[in-house]
Amino acid sequence: QLQLAESGGGLVQPGKSLRLSCRAPRAIFSVFIDYTIGWYRQAPGKQRELVADITSDRTPRYADSVKDRFTITRDNSRKTVWLQMNSLLPEDTGVYYCNALGQDGTSDWGQGTQVTVSS
């Protein structure tokens, strides 16, 4: 089980950028590297949805709505995954959650960080 900590959310104007971080400071390196780490978001009144994830071999996957605007990367030595969000839109507003999916199907969630895109 991984304990995840998100950071980097905030209030920004449309068109601006934010970078979210998801850290697993207590994870053992040899365990962390086997997890797929994903970013999900939940807007008010809507279901949680996948924004992007990255596998243990660093293969990224993106929701169509964020392709060419968001980039997910990971540094296993730092046990950290980042989500670089550019050209933010009001519809990107929501609580962003980090998820760690183990190869055995276990799933761990962070507490979430609020992102608000508004003028």
Image (spheres, grey):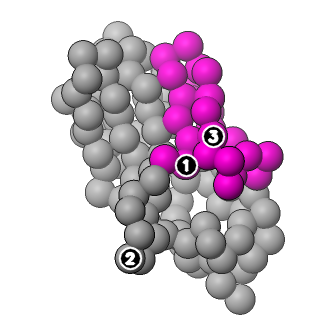
Mark 3 belongs to which amino acid?
Tyr
If you read the primary sequence from the N terminus, does the residue marked by circle 2 or circle 3 appear first? 2
**Image depth: mark 2 or mark 1 in front:** 2
Tell me if I can see residue 74 in this picture.
yes
Crowding at dot 3, Cα within 10 Å, few <14 / some 14-19 / many 20+, comes out as: some
Question: Can you tell which quarter of the image residue 61 is in?
Answer: top right
- Tell me: 9 left or right of 47: right
Question: CA separation, marks 2 and 3?
Answer: 22 Å
Residue occupying the point 38% across, 62% down: 47
Could you tell me if the residues under marks 2 and 3 are in contact, i.e. CB atoms within 8 Å? no
Magenta stretch: give its range.
50-75
| Residue 105 drawn above or below residue 95 | above
| Residue 115 drawn above or below residue 30 | below
Residue matched to label 1: 51
Question: Is residue 69 shown in magenta?
Answer: yes
Question: CA separation, marks 2 and 1?
Answer: 17 Å
Residue matched to label 3: 62
What is the x, y in percent for residue 20?
Answer: 55, 53
What is the x, y in percent for residue 10?
Answer: 54, 72
- Tell me: 116 left or right of 97: right
For label 1, the SS is strand
Could you tell me if the residues under marks 3 and 1 are in contact, i.e. CB atoms within 8 Å? yes
Question: CA separation, marks 3 and 1?
Answer: 6 Å
- Which mark is drawn over residue 45? 2
Image quarter (top left, top right, bottom left or bottom right) of the C terminus:
bottom right
Mark 2 belongs to which amino acid?
Gly
| Residue 3 drawn above or below residue 94 | above
What is the x, y in percent for residue 31?
Answer: 31, 15
